[in-house]
Image (cartoon, helix red, strand yellow):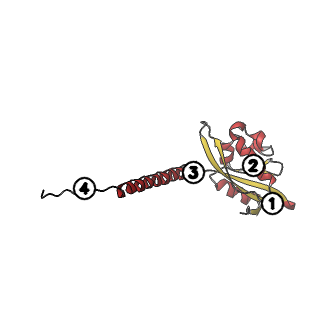
Amino acid sequence: MNTPSFGWDDHALAAHYMNEIKDPLFVMDNEARIQDGNPAFFDFVNLKRSDAIGNHLDACTHNGERLQPLLETVSIMLSEVNPERAFVTIEDEYKNPQTTLLTPISLTRNKGERLLAIRIEDVSEMVNERAEIEAEKLAVIDRAETLKQLNEELEGCSFLHYNKEY
């Protein structure tokens, strides 16, 4: 799957769209410096916008240990020409595992400068639901196998028929 690519020259329009997205979304340059982000992103990393813009991503995360898997994946995405979406498990503020889907979007700014926007989507509920469905499928397969074995055992048995007239 190719990463979508868009122009970033109309900053006002881009900022409008960024602010409409409820999931954390941020834009960084090739040096992993944050160029912009939406309010959900700054809440996610627990920073003010003014403290983050222009700074390196890992310097902007006070909770770096919690976000370390995310930071490592973003570094890999920056090094790739066409980065793919990636699932990353991090800890939420209560130390519970949270599965996130990182979706990269390649952007270009004046004179072809490459930027990378990344959307961080919490997909924990979807992953948990799929795991429950898979567990239910395995339970059904197990019950079917048990029934098959019981049926085979019954086929080998002979039954005495009781005659009521006796």
Q: Kindly identify which residue carries mark 1.
A: 108
Q: Residues within 10 Å of mark 2 (few under 14, many from 20)?
A: many
Q: Is residue 42 left or right of residue 130?
A: right
Q: How far from the left and from the top, in percent, is residue 139?
A: 46, 51
Separation of marks 4 and 2 at Cα, in angstroms: 72 Å
Q: Which residue is drawn at the image coordinates 70% and 41% (left, top)?
A: 67
Pair 3/1: label in front? 3
* Position of the C terminus by quadrant: bottom left
Q: Name which of mark 3 and mark 1 comes first in the sequence.
A: 1
Mark 2: amino acid: Val
Among all residues in the image, which is located at the extreme left?
165
Q: Name which of mark 1 and mark 2 comes first in the sequence.
A: 2
Q: Kindly identify which residue carries mark 2.
A: 74
Between 33 and 95, the residue placed more toward the observer is 95
Between 39 and 134, the residue placed more toward the observer is 134
Marker disc for residue 127:
3
Q: Residues within 10 Å of mark 3 (few under 14, many from 20)?
A: some
Q: Which residue is drawn at the image coordinates 79% and 52% (left, top)?
A: 78
Q: Name which of mark 4 and mark 1 comes first in the sequence.
A: 1
